[in-house]
Amino acid sequence: MVIVFLGPPGVGKGTQCRLLAASSGLPHVSTGELFRKAVAQASDISQHVAARLSAGQLVDDRLVFDVVEWRLGQSDCRKGCILDGFPRNLSQAEWLDQWLAQRGRNVDLVIALNAAESELVDRLLRRASQEHRSDDTLETVRTRLALYRSHTEPLVDYYRRRGVLVEVDGLGTPEEVARRIRQAMDQRIGGTGPGDNREG
């Protein structure tokens, strides 16, 4: 089963992906983590990635494709995975569809987490302070949220039209949000019709 998580920065995708990975046994594939590891390596690619991340910008699609293809080709992803941070735009979604189709697979479920932007800004700045993350300043946070609205938010409609989208309220404790996700998944897997299920 291939599950995609969508949602703006700070909504808690990483936490929910890790919780779902632990309960489902599917590997959590986080492009953010992959790129942060790449930055630690001394190479021209790592310098390019580091420069874009520090400015709150997106990494080039071609580089993203290379990293994702390498990760999805590993043995632990043969039965599926949970994608966190990919796809981020329509061209990436189309690339993923083609890559999966060539292997007789498809995106089975897309979980879109929602939260008010003011809450997201507070969360990201609080996390930056707690974790000493230099890539989360007020300026880069606003840049990242604007990029999400312009590049990634259109994927909500893209996957809604495909009939694989469920929307979940991302506010609350991690346990509360995880329970909403599980309920939405149970409804979808239990045979609800196409379209989106909205969790309030």
Image (spheres, rainbow, N blue to C red):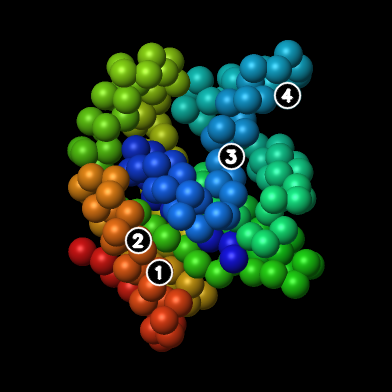
At numbered mark 3, what does the secondary structure look like: helix, strand or loop? helix
Q: Position of residue 141 (x, y in %)?
A: 36, 29
Q: Amino acid at mark 3?
A: Thr
Q: CA distance from mark 4 to mark 3?
A: 15 Å
**SS for tag 4?**
helix
Q: Is residue 96 left or right of residue 173?
A: right
Label 4, label 1: how far apart the Cα atoms are: 38 Å
Residue on which the image places disc 3? 31
- Residue at position x 56%, y 33% from top? 33
Judged left or right of residue 114, residue 146 is: right
Q: Position of residue 37 (x, y in %)?
A: 63, 25
Residue to which mark 4 is pinned:
45
> In the rendered structure, which amino acid carries the disc numbered 2?
Ile
Question: Which numbered disc covers residue 185?
Answer: 1
x and y percentages locating residue 189 in the rendered image: 45, 77
- Mark 1–mark 3 Cα distance, whole angstroms, equals 23 Å
Q: Quadrant of the N terminus?
A: bottom right
Q: Which residue is mark 2?
A: 181
Residue type marked 4 = Ile
Indicate the amino acid at tag 1.
Answer: Met
In front: label 4 or label 1:
1
